[in-house]
Amino acid sequence: MQTVSLIAVGLIVIHAIWCLLCPRVSDGVLGKFLYLMLSLAAFAFISKPSPFSQMLLNVSFASIAARHWWMKTYWVNVKREVNRYIHKHGKR
């Protein structure tokens, strides 16, 4: 069971580092920071598995999931409204 967990966390580390370094992943500064946080939390879990390192891993993964949900659900509409406001009121 421990081996399966370590393999899964190793894959999370590889994916998080790839998202952090790959220029094709355009998540901005916040997204890059969240992937950095995820990779560091996964490294902490691999080096010394404990309830605290597990909690850090879960929180960092949940924050990426929450950001993804926000970007897919609300950001398109918010961005459209901000651009509409800027184009309507910005040129004076």
Image (cartoon, helix red, strand yellow):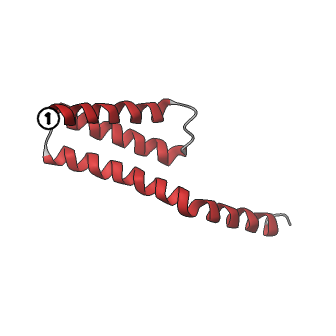
Question: Image check: 58 left or right of 70?
Answer: left
Frontmost residue, 48 versus 15: 15
Frontmost residue, 24 versus 1: 1
The residue that disc 1 covers is: 2
For label 1, the crowd category at 10 Å Cα-Cα, with few meaning under 14, some 14 to 19 and many 20 or more, is few
At 52% from the left edge and 44% from the top edge, which residue is drawn? Answer: 29
Please state the horizontal and vertical placement of residue 16, each as a whole percent of the image: 40, 36
Question: Image check: 18 left or right of 60?
Answer: right
At 80% from the left edge and 63% from the top edge, which residue is drawn? Answer: 87
Q: Is residue 28 above or below residue 15?
A: below
Please state the horizontal and vertical placement of residue 63, each as a whole percent of the image: 38, 53
Q: Quadrant of the C terminus?
A: bottom right
| Element under disc 1 | helix
Residue 3 quadrant: top left
What type is the residue that disc 1 sits on?
Answer: Gln
Question: Image check: 72 left or right of 43?
Answer: right
Q: Quadrant of the N terminus?
A: top left
